[in-house]
Image (spheres, rainbow, N blue to C red):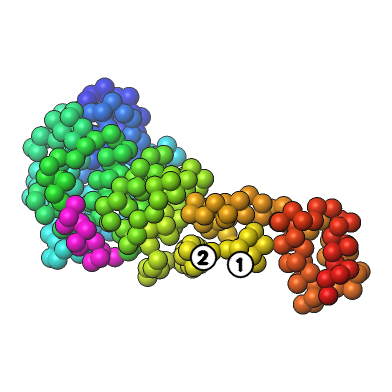
Amino acid sequence: MLKALRENPIARRAAEALRGFDVYFVGGFVRDALLGKSCLDIDLVLVPWGSDPGRELRDAIFTLAGAFGVKPKRSQFLTGKLVLEEGEIDIALARKEEYPEPGSLPIVGPARSLEEDLRRRDFTANAIAMSLGGELVDPLRGAEDVKARVLRVIHRGSFRDDPTRALRAIRYRHQLGFSYSDETEKEFALAKKFMARVSFERIKHELARSSARPERARIWLEMAERNLVGERMPEREALFALSERARLSPDSWVLFYALVSESIPAGLTRAERKLLSCIIRNARREFSGLAEAHEELRAAPEEALIALGALNPLLEDYRKRRPSSRPLMSAEEMKAMGFSGEKLGKAILALEKERIEERIKTPAEEREFLKNLF
């Protein structure tokens, strides 16, 4: 593990800066190091010595910030963050969590030890700590599960406490090439039962992270097959087509969600709500041809057409043809022919419909068409 520490510039500098604190590397950095992978997003946990943990955390945060020459960010749950050009560092006080109800946010308090902090985590593979000197602290034998590439929940009822752990498990499975332990497999039923109690903001966060992954087609498919998100199962081919055509971006979660659900959750941005509404409204609509599709979708965002095209070959054809629907004649030329106001708008739409059906291809054909339009 010392090799992983020496070869990671962010981890190495953080370890040097925090020698005076009882700090450990945790989470994905340690897991990925055991897998022989590099990770530039570092998670640290501080086990306080004295009676003022908050002050110790502040001191550690500003010590780190000074070492990297950046301004720190404070966030919730006794944590701090440094955003670097190469990656990020999150540092938190060792803490414990209690879930008063299934799917609720946890009640957070200070942990009495590093082990208590590790036991609150989602999977044993993520519950391994490493000292600043490179020594593993592994009370849950997570290193064995990493070696075996197994995702194992830490306690029974883990997905009842936080159903979004099921979404995370699916992402880890396909991202890391892991399999589920028997205990983890049994937890999915609890996630399905209690997912409706989780705020959509938390679900959206997990969907966004998955939608930025190269493996997202398989992630989306498993989420849909397990009925953890939404209420319908799209065709496998539609999910894979969507993944292939959409941008590899966290924002693509909206397109996936539109394929598995007919509802518009609360808490979306205006743009997300508009995009989702457009897709859902047209997903099951039968269009007689490209011209009718254009009348409805001429102003639709490209992202909406990508999702609709994954469901309907006609709309994928429309998506590809829509850029060529723009008339070759200018609005000024049409005005010179006597079109203005509402009639001009109708003339442009009529020309676009003819062009997208490839019945008109030249300016001369456009002028002839307009002569007989009204």
Q: Position of residue 36 (x, y in %)?
A: 28, 25
Residue at image location 84% in from the left, 53% down from the top: 362
Would residue 321 be seen by someone viewing this image from the given angle? yes
**Which residue is under mark 1?**
296
Query: What percent of the width, then of the height, locates residue 224?
Result: 32, 53
Instruction: Specify the amino acid type for callout 1.
Output: Glu
Q: Quadrant of residue 52?
A: bottom left
Q: Is residue 95 above or below residue 179?
A: below
* Residue 190 inside the magenta-drawn segment: yes
Q: In this rendering, does residue 91 appear at all?
A: no
User: In the rendering, at what x and y percent does residue 63 appear?
Assistant: 30, 43
- Region rendered in magenta: 188-199
10 Å crowding of disc 2: few (<14), some (14-19), many (20+): few
Query: Dot 2: what SS?
Result: loop
Most distant residue in the right direction: 336
* Mark with earlier residue (2, 1): 2
Closer to the eye: label 2 or 1? 2
Whether the residues at callouts 2 and 1 have beta carbons within 8 Å, the answer is yes
Depicted 79 relative to depicted 4: above or below: below
Label 2 is placed on what type of residue?
Arg
**Which dot marks residue 285?**
2
Horizontal relation, residue 306 to residue 110: left or right: right
Name the residue: 60% across, 63% down: 288
Most common secondary structure along the magenta stretch: helix
Q: Nearer the viewer, residue 39 or 198?
A: 198
Which residue corresponds to the image point at 39% horizontal and 44% vertical from the top-left? 217
Quadrant (top left, top right, bottom left, bottom right) of the C terminus = bottom right
- What is the crowding at mark 1: few (fewer than 14 residues within 10 Å), some, or many (at least 20)? few
The residue sitting at 89% across, 56% down in the picture is 364
